[in-house]
Image (spheres, grey):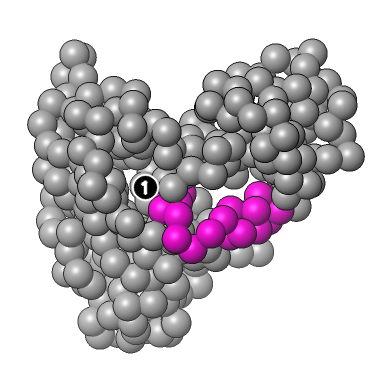
């Protein structure tokens, strides 16, 4: 089972072009969709989830025509949006029971069994009777994924699930996502590169509504070896480096600027080559896209 997206476009009434001819094939397993805020990720996720229609294009999930068979797609869909509300006075057990009925789990025994299993899987069983109004952000996110997993969906979409979580809750949530079956399509939409690096054997980068790259992390990282250079510099020197070179990232380490540059050969004195990672891939594609050029590495989308 795979998800196939072809030539998807969407322009909102205010003139914002959120999707610009997106074509993408997403296989079973974890798939990361990387992009900055405003890249079009949420628009794409909502469209796949049948919450809005595109202007043009098609989406197929196995034999299903998603845009024409919305109700059938919803029967096999689990969706955790970026923002969702919970009744603060209700307990997780009651909330899951309610959503289980909405998802068509009318057999009482089967419904109770699924709710209990999901509470245990999300480490919420001990607080199953407590009101969610007192839950932390991470606990609410875990309850959200439990709701999404009701009914054993074949397609699961999670939109920015770890944004705002502390490190402990982030890792707990990522471990939970990693436990979802390999035969299920799971789309992790995020701007956090580490989330994709830790979980996803396949990923794509989107920015400005356009697909910049799609492939396997290790394959595209290999194409950058010998082309990523690092230098500890000064605040005074930094503007000139940014003007002359393709600086893909800048960060402070012990108060001093450290730049990473993409270039085939050594950019100059003081630079040393470093082993690339997925963050370098991401920043490079975003930098190239912002300059209006096509990315020269990996397999362009």
Quadrant in which the C terminus is drawn: bottom left
Q: Is residue 147 above or below residue 91?
A: below
What residue appears at the point 42 percent right and 68 percent down from the top-left corner? 201
Q: Read off the magenta span.
A: 169-190
Percent position (x, y) of residue 241? 33, 64
What residue appears at the point 49 percent right and 63 percent down from the top-left corner? 182
Q: Is residue 245 visible?
A: yes
Quadrant in which the N terminus is drawn: bottom left
Within-10-Å neighbours for mark 1: few <14, some 14–19, many 20+: many
The answer to which quarter of the image holds residue 244 is bottom left
- Helix, strand, or loop for circle 1? loop
Q: Is residue 36 shown in magenta?
A: no
Report whether 13 appears left or right of 107. left
Percent position (x, y) of residue 290? 22, 48
Report whether 10 appears left or right of 77. left
Which residue is nearer to you in this view: 58 or 190?
58
The answer to which quarter of the image holds residue 64 is top left
The count of marks equals 1
Q: Which residue is mark 1?
A: 35
Which residue is nearer to you in this view: 38 or 19?
19
Report whether 41 appears left or right of 95. left
What residue appears at the point 20 percent right and 38 percent down from the top-left corner? 65
Percent position (x, y) of residue 263? 26, 76
Percent position (x, y) of residue 99? 61, 24
Q: Is residue 280 visible?
A: no
Report whether 114 appears left or right of 298. right
Which residue is nearer to you in this view: 86 or 119?
119
What residue appears at the point 13 percent right and 26 percent down from the top-left corner? 55
Q: Is residue 189 shown in magenta?
A: yes
Q: Is residue 112 above or below residue 286?
A: above
């Amino acid at each position: 089972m795979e998800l196939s997206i072809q030539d998807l476009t969407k322009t909102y009434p205010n003139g914002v072009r959120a999707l610009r001819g997106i074509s993408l094939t997403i296989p079973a397993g974890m798939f990361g969709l990387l992009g900055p805020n405003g890249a079009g990720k949420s628009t794409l996720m909502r469209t796949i989830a049948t919450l809005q229609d595109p202007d043009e294009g098609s989406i197929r999930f196995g034999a299903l025509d998603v845009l024409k068979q919305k109700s059938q797609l919803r029967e096999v869909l689990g969706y955790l949006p970026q923002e969702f509300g919970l009744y603060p006075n209700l307990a997780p057990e009651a909330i899951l029971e309610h959503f289980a009925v909405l998802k068509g789990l009318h057999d009482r025994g089967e419904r109770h069994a699924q709710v209990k299993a999901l509470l245990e899987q999300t480490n919420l069983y001990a607080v199953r009777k407590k009101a969610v109004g007192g839950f932390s952000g991470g606990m609410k996110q875990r309850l959200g994924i439990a709701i999404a997993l009701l009914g054993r969906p074949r397609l699961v979409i999670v939109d920015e699930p770890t944004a705002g979580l502390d490190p402990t809750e982030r890792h707990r949530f990522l471990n939970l996502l990693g436990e979802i079956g390999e035969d299920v399509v799971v789309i992790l939409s995020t701007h956090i590169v580490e989330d994709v690096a830790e979980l996803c054997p396949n990923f794509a980068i989107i920015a400005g509504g356009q697909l910049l790259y799609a492939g396997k992390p290790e394959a595209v990282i290999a194409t950058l070896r010998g082309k990523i250079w690092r230098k500890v510099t000064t605040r005074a020197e930094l503007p000139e480096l940014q003007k002359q070179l393709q600086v893909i990232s800048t960060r402070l380490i012990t108060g001093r600027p450290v730049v990473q540059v993409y270039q085939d050969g050594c950019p100059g004195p003081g630079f040393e080559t470093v082993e690339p990672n997925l963050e370098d891939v991401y920043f490079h594609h975003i930098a190239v896209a912002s300059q209006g050029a096509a990315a020269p590495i990996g397999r362009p989308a």
